[in-house]
């Protein structure tokens, strides 16, 4: 017998819950491997040979991508039925694809950990269609094929839901972003022997995801949550969304040129990449104005304070991480010296956290109380714990960014712009950066504590519900 959830507009939205739960589990794994890497920066033989640095890095970055994809899929399964004003086309297909994707992800991570990478390539038939060996795209070819199958089934499911239901700006922007995500992933199957050509197509996946179609997904998720928590007219939100995605696509697509500066590409990319990359902070700043304007003009005081904080916080952190820190080293004359330094790591950490990790946690914060049958918001104690998690994670990520930025500045000074004209070797430079890496590691531990607070807030909600039910039973 199916138990009806009175807090969901459509019962099929419940399929989002396992996606959200598994995404957060993978998020914990990503942070743990990040801490392992952070310690290996200063204690080089930590966990060697059990978990070498290259394996820890591969697991850390792959878990980042996979948990965000689970978060995006869960978000789509939650908001698309509500936007389309109808039940999901096939909840059973959504659950089946969840288990296929989860199994493929777990087996791939286990393969990284327990099988030498060359052996994993041979075991999975990489010689028949070579796709392995590139950062973020290390997955075996068979895993990549599985991802394509899952993506097709997912797009079919939400596409049929939209075709049979109401079409809104939010749902169409979300669908466009998800289709782009799937299409651009196909470039991961093309692995040319020429290194310059290889980098072209590699960035067609990585950049066009994170600085292209993912921004559409982020914008749609943010707009959905803001409508729900502020009660502002949909027409107002949609006008903002149109402007933001237009700027994001124009600057993001041509801004890809900042990756073509020094890979053997034509000189024109030095200008195209610099000019349009300099414009990339604009859509993120527009998101800040968008969120704060909507909250300022709200027609209702939503009881979920934590979700409101996440919605505002993600725009500010994304603006600084993706916008400001991206701009710091995106102009060609500057990038000539900073390319591949710790400044890149600083930008990457704050940008991924602010733009994508936080927007997923924003939607989870809004949707999970309803998915768990708690109503619009959890109790005040749970929200307080969640807000503590927000500030601990966000401030520690800012600290990580600042420490890596300082490390990058020192690295450039010692290794690439030496005062006496003699560049310091890479390993000697890393030795000089040890204090920053220790501080980064300490901040990473605080981030983990913040994530534990975020997760514990869900436990608090469950306890509160059980206590209320017990009290109701006694009074009856």
Image (spheres, helix red, strand yellow):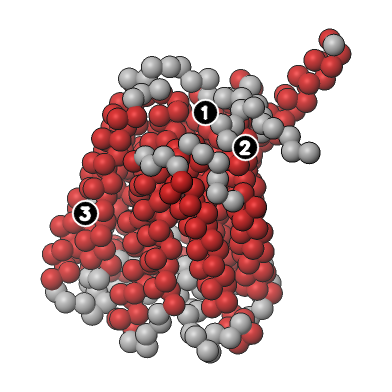
Horizontal and vertical percent position of residue 401: 41, 49
Which is more toward the observer, 394 or 149? 149
- In the rendered structure, which disc, 3 or 2, sits on the residue that comes first in sequence? 2
355 relative to 115 in the view: left or right = left
Quarter of the figure that contains the N terminus: top right
Q: CA distance from mark 3 to mark 1?
A: 33 Å
User: On the image, which quarter does residue 33 sit in?
Assistant: bottom right
Q: Residue at left 76%, top 19%?
A: 468
Q: In the image, what residue occupies the spot 36% across and 53% down?
A: 176
Q: Nearer the viewer, mark 3 or mark 1?
A: 3
Q: Residue at x 57, y 77 (%)?
A: 142
Q: Is residue 232 above or below residue 395?
A: above
Residue wearing tag 1: 306
Residue 250 bears which disc, if any? 3
Q: Nearer the viewer, residue 146 or 202?
A: 146
Q: Earlier in the sequence, mark 3 or mark 1?
A: 3
Among numbered discs 2 and 1, the one appearing first in the sequence: 2
Which residue in the structure is indicated by mark 2? 11
User: For the residue labelled by badge 3, is the local secondary structure a helix, a strand or a loop?
Assistant: helix
SS type, badge 2: helix
Q: Nearer the viewer, mark 3 or mark 2?
A: 2
Q: Position of residue 34 (x, y in %)?
A: 56, 57
In the displayed structure, does residue 314 sit left or right of residue 409?
A: right
């Amino acid at each position: 017998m199916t138990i009806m959830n009175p807090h969901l507009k459509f019962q099929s939205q419940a399929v989002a819950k396992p996606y959200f739960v598994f995404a957060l589990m993978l998020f914990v794994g990503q942070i743990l491997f990040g801490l392992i890497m952070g310690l290996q920066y200063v204690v080089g033989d930590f966990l060697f040979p059990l978990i070498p640095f290259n394996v820890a890095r591969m697991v850390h970055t792959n878990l980042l991508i996979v948990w965000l994809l689970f978060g995006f899929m869960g978000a789509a399964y939650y908001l698309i039925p509500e936007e389309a004003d109808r039940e999901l086309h096939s909840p059973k297909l959504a659950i089946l694809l969840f288990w296929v994707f989860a199994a493929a992800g777990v087996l791939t991570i286990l393969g990284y950990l327990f099988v030498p990478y060359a052996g994993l390539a041979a075991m999975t038939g990489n010689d028949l269609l070579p796709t392995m060996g590139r950062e973020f795209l290390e997955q075996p070819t068979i895993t990549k094929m599985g991802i394509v199958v899952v993506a097709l089934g997912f797009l079919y499911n939400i596409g049929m839901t939209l075709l049979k239901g109401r079409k809104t700006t939010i749902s169409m922007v979300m669908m466009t972003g998800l289709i782009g995500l799937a299409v651009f992933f196909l470039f991961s199957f093309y692995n040319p022997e020429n290194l310059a050509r290889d980098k072209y197509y590699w960035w067609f996946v990585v950049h066009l995801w994170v600085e292209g179609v993912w921004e559409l997904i982020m914008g749609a998720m943010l707009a959905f949550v803001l409508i729900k928590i502020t009660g502002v007219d949909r027409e107002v939100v949609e006008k903002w969304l149109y402007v933001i995605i237009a700027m994001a696509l124009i600057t993001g697509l041509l801004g890809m040129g900042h990756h073509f500066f020094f890979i053997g590409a034509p000189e024109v990319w030095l200008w195209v990449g610099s000019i349009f990359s300099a414009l990339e902070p604009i859509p993120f700043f527009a998101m800040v104005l968008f969120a704060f304007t909507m909250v300022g003009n709200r027609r209702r005081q939503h009881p979920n304070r934590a979700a409101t904080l996440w919605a505002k916080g993600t725009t500010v952190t994304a603006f600084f991480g993706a916008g400001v820190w991206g701009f710091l080293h995106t102009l060609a004359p500057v990038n000539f010296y900073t390319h591949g330094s710790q400044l890149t790591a600083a930008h990457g950490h704050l940008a991924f956290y602010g733009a994508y990790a936080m927007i997923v946690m924003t939607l989870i914060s809004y949707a999970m109380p309803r998915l768990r049958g708690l109503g619009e918001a959890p109790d005040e104690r749970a929200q307080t714990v969640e807000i503590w998690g927000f500030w601990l994670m966000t401030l520690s990520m800012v600290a990580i960014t600042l420490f890596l930025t300082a490390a990058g500045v020192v690295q450039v000074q010692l290794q690439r712009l030496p005062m006496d004209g003699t560049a310091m070797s890479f390993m000697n430079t890393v030795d000089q950066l040890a204090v920053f890496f220790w501080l980064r590691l300490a901040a990473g531990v605080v981030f983990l504590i913040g994530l534990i607070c975020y997760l514990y807030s869900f436990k608090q909600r469950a306890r509160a519900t059980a206590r209320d039910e017990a009290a109701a039973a006694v009074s009856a």
